[in-house]
Image (cartoon, rainbow, N blue to C red):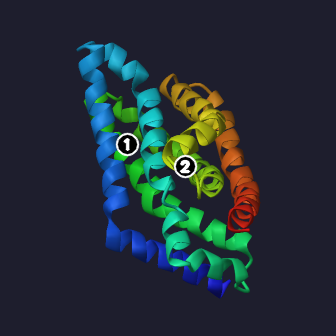
Amino acid sequence: MSAFLALLKRDLTLAVREGAALGTALGFYLVVVAMLPLGLGPDLKLLSRIAPGILWIALLLAALLSLARLFEADHEDGSLEVMATAPLPLELAVAAKALAHWISTGIPLALMAPVIGLMLNLDIALTPALIATMLAGTPAISFLGSVGAALTLNARRGGLLLALLVLPLYIPTLIFGISAIGFAGVAQHGFGASFLILLAISVASMAAAPVAAAAALRLQMS
């Protein structure tokens, strides 16, 4: 457990020191959401109705920007080979790196969503539901993304291939995240069911994705 926490702390420290990945993700998130009202027009009711979907889709795309570098830097400096031969199982090392990505990227994007949502005339009353669903759903983004990052580690133009591999896996998270906010907006009881399914998807991703990503990394390093 100490090795797991040390690796988690290392990745979080590197993310804070560099800052470029989070800054790029937040900047992309802001630009995408800011440009959509220009194309859709000034209809405030329309913007308010589609705001949760736009925020979720923009969050997914913003998170993808930093996923491509999840293992790349460690692979370039040889750290990945050390992790593969260390006493800590590679599956736990992958889990630590994915968890660090969620803490350093997923949580800031989720907390930023209500502020950016003001540009889409997002109902303020939906803020708690929006934050809760994004915090519950974004772990799946980081952990499922780790599988795609591992599979595309040695690929040319890996970022595009990563998006093609991972985006279909994000569809359940996207569907239940948006539906949960929709139920919260009309004060229906379906919010709880959608939210629990969203949590279940994240928990299942946290359990299964490190195993698949570790297997892909071993294949890439063989």
Q: Which mark is on residue 205? A: none
Give the residue type that dot 1 points to: Ala
User: For mark 2, does the 10 Å Cα neighbourhood hold few (<14), some (14 to 19), or many (20 or more) residues?
Assistant: many
Q: Position of residue 139 (x, y in %)?
A: 59, 53
Q: Position of residue 165 (x, y in %)?
A: 63, 40
Residue position for label 2: 138
- Locate residue 119: give its quadrant: top left
* Whether residue 197 is situated above or below residue 139 in the rendered picture: above
Residue position for label 1: 113
- Residue at image point 74% right, 62% down: 219
In what element is the residue under mark 2?
helix
Q: Position of residue 23 (x, y in %)?
A: 30, 56
In front of the other: 219 or 23: 219
- Residue at image point 56% right, 45% down: 162
* Whether residue 154 is situated above or below residue 57 in the rendered picture: below
In what element is the residue under mark 1?
helix
Of the numbered discs 1 and 2, the one sitting upstream in the chain is 1
**Quarter of the image that includes the C terminus:** bottom right
**Quarter of the image that includes the N terminus:** bottom right
